[in-house]
Each structure stands twice: as structure tokens, then as C-alpha cells.
Image (cartoon, grey):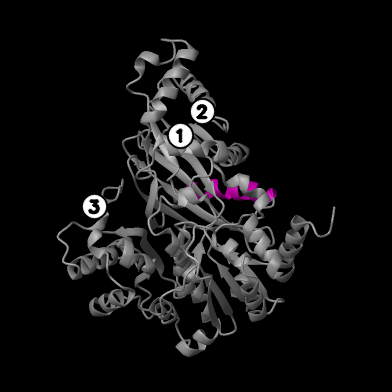
Amino acid sequence: MNVLDPTVQFQHLQTQLRDRWRNVSEFDTSEADIIVIPSISIDQRELLKIEGFLHYEERLLFSLIRLRNPRTRVVYVTSQPIHPSVIDYYLQLLPGIPFSHARDRLLLLSTYDSSLKPLSQKILDRPRLIDRIRQAVNPDRAYMICYNSTNVERDLSIQLDIPLYALDPSLLNWGTKSGSRQIFAESGIPFPDGSELVWNPKDLAVVTAELWERNPDLQRVVIKLNEGFSGEGNALLDLRNLREYQPGVVSHEQRVIKVYDQFAHLKFEAKKETWENYSSQIPELGAIAEAFIEGEHKLSPSAQGRVTPGGEVEILSTHDQILGGPSGQIYLGCQFPADESYRMQIQDMSMQVGRALAQKGALERFAVDFVAVKRDDQWEFHAIEINLRKGGTTHPFMTLKFLTNGRYDLSSGLFYSQHGRPKYYMATDNLQKPQYCGLLPNDLMDIIAHYGLHFDTSTETGTVFHLMGCLSEFGKLGLTSIGNSPQQAEDLYRRVVKAIDDETKSSECGHLSAMRWNSGY
């Protein structure tokens, strides 16, 4: 094989990570030059379903908290410049570090390009920008992090000649809907019955009918784009009104025809989605059909882990997810940790998944989403999908970890600060109301200061905000409320919502009431 083959070059760079950091604690605390490329490199049609997606490049700003190490430097690149007050906000969170000292070790760069191309591609299109990034770091201690790893991030890593602390893109299949199902099968953990991967609507109708035939009592089927994002690529097919076509009543061929006709009436999770647009993506992205898990008492826990450069599997956190959308499949936020009655089971199953991924050569972040249904006082679990990227639960947890310099305790599933106190939080990417539109980042800072909503480093409680760039245009904001108990975290969250509502003279109810919060909110 040619030594200039990009796959070989990339693998050589990733090997450098393993050579530099032999264990987890060494990697987390080492002095380093970190190049943050928060590119959301997914199908752009999927991105368009998310309001303010360009500002999601701000979700990795928790990385700035790494500047608490006085010998760490960070280069942060975005499509458009980030408002200075947002940067100041993060730097002022650093305990014991002079603001000016941290700011001198931070280099902010921008492509000044708001097009739909992934940020990583925008950087590749600008050789002078690549040169500037390369000149700003020490290659012997530098590495690059990203939101998700694709061939574009791999190519950027090669161009910079800097290792990428992320998944090899050749392994991306294990993070798709169909790939996740294969990993679950190999790991021996329960997951819903479903179909093979197909590439056109007619074949999708066939495998959906076959799924129904294997499960005659099935009420609903989830249709999933194989590379959907945050639940936005999911749709629901209701079988309850098609009983005259159920197995044993009509032929397989008749059932397939009826299912195909019903695709035009799918209930899509994404706003304004149509079958015409959705079906056009199937030949490119692929799709599967999966049994929808029914249940009156149903929760959506997840676990987050990572595979270290040395090949160790580490569970980082468990969460109960807050979901929304027509059938509750779109991620809105989360609560840490997951419910005490099942968090250890979620943790153990996710460890099995992590080991299977590590055997295939995976590196860095992975998350496993579950559906938990309570039947006869017992929890029943179904693994739903694997995300091989940083996701909605990544930045809240990493914010907590970097701010408190604490640790996750595998034996209890709790997180303890350096002072030995367990910490809890409630977080969202989707605090969004029409009356918030027009609020500038400086306006938010005024509200935070006036109501005392900031994170207090002395008590290690309070709220940390993100996605502030979304606020003015989309009325959308992200936040993580950290407390010393679940109730305190919720109270802090509600206090933020009330304060912003009061300042925007809202008469609407709080954001939590609009969420699908299945544990009683």
C-alpha cells in the first residue's frame, strides 16, 4: 500500500496519541495544545431541520475550561466569529486563573463562511488558515478534537499533521442505526426487532411488512434514516388502523402494497418534513424499520463512555433524557444521573457495548440510548442506538467535570466533586420561546448578573449557559443547572426560565411543562 495513502497517514497520527498518553488520568491532566474543530459534519438536509444549527459549533466551548491548566493552549475555530462576551463568560468560569492569562493562551479563528458546508471542509478550502493553525501549536503535544469524525475531519488532521482524538471514519458504520443493531447483537444486550438496511422505499415497505409478520401484535413501527441526527430522521408508521391488513388476514403482497401507500402518511419527528423529501434521502443514507416500544411508564436513559488512546473503556455518565417531538423521539435535554433503580444496569450494558467497539478499533466518545419500560414493577430495557460522536449529553457532563475537577464513581453511578460532594444537573439545548428572540448575548449577561444566575465556583452550584449565539435570531438557548441534589438542580433550572420569562414579559408557562418528561413533571 502506498505510504501516502490517507488511511495509513491517519492511523500513524492516531498511534501518536497512544504513544503519548498511556492512561486516562495522564491524558486528562496533561499539558497540551488542543485544536477544537466543532464541525457538525452530517447530511446537510438533516442539519436544516435544526433551528440555529450553525451556532451548535458553540457546544464545544466547554473545552475552554481546559485552560484552567496554566500550560494548556486552545485553538478554537468556527464558521463565524463568536460574540466576545460569550468568550469572556467562559473564561471567567475558570477558578484560580487570571482572565488575561487564560485569554493569552486562547486563539480564536473563523472562516467567515456561513454556508452549509461542514466547518472542516471550509478550513480545508483555506490553506492559509491551515498554516496559521499549524504555526500556533507545538506538534509534539498537540491534538485535534471535533464534534463528529468523518473523512473530512480525517483529511484535516492529515493536512495539519496533528492527531485527531476521535473515531477513525472507516468505523463510522458502527454508529449508524443498522450498525448499532449489529453491535447490540454482538454484545448480547436486548434491542427491538427490526429490519436489515435497505436503500429504496419499495424495499422498505417489504421489510416493514416482514417485521409486522414476525410481530402480529405490533402497534407502531419506527422508520429511521440510517444516519439520522438527534431523532430528526425518525418517522412513525401507525399500524393500529390497518388491522384488515394484519398477518393472517391478507397476503404478504397485499400487506406490502398497503404499507407502501401508508408511507405518505408517516408522522415525522422533524417539523415540516414531507415524504417526498424524506424518501429522496433513502437511496443516499439508507433506512431501517424497527418495532416501536410501547408502554405506559416509559423512560429514555442513556450512558456515555469513551475508549481511551490506550484501548481502555471508561463509562463517563448515565442520564435520563428529556425527549419531545410528535412521538417523543427528539432529544431536548437530560438529567444527571439516571434513575437510581436502573442506572447500574444501563452502565453495565453500555460497558459491554464499549468493549465491542474497542475491539473494532473505536476511539473516544460513544453513547448508548435505551428505552426503559416498567412492567409489573420490573424495568425492561431495549438498546436503541449508538452515537459515535459528541452529543447532547457530552457538553453538560464535561462542563461539570472541568469546572469541579471531580470524578465519576463507577460503583454508584454518581459524580463527586473534589470536596467529595455528589453533584447533579439538569440540562437542555432547547430552551426556546418566541419572546426570547432579539435578546443579545449582552442582554443575557445582564439578566444573569441581575438575578444571580451564574455558576458559583465557591459552592460549585449554579447555571452554565451555552448556545448563546442562537438566542437573538431563534429565541433558543442551552443551559446546564448544577446542584447538590436533583431538586436543587431542578430549582436552579426553573429559576433561570422564570427570570428570562419575566425579563421578556412572558405570560407563557415554563419550558419544562412543554417537555415530554415521563417521570412525572
Alpha carbon distance from label 3 to label 1: 28 Å
- Of badges 3 and 2, the one in the foreground is 2
Tell me where the magenta segment starts and ends, as one range: 344-360
* Residue 187 sits above or below residue 12 on the image: above
Distance in Å between CA atoms under marks 3 and 2: 36 Å
Looking at the image, is 82 positioned above or below residue 368? below
Residue 64 visible: yes
Q: Give SS at disc 2.
A: helix
Q: Label 2 near label 1: C-beta < 8 Å?
A: yes
Which label belongs to residue 223? 1
Q: Is residue 401 visible?
A: no
Q: Which mark is residue 204?
A: 2
Q: Is residue 24 left or right of residue 202?
A: right
Q: Mark 1: which secondary structure?
A: strand
User: Which is nearer the eye, 141 or 41?
Assistant: 41
**In the rendered picture of this protein, how many numbered marks are placed on residues?**
3
Residue 102, position as x, y percentages in the image: 50, 85
Whether the magenta-drawn stretch holds residue 174 is answered as no
User: Left or right: 390 with respect to 160?
Assistant: left
Mark toward the start of the polypeptide (1 vs 2): 2
Q: Which residue is mark 3?
A: 513
- Classify mark 3: residues with Cα within 10 Å, few (<14), some (14-19) or many (20+): few
Percent of width and height locating residue 194 = 51, 30
Q: Amino acid at mark 3?
A: Ser
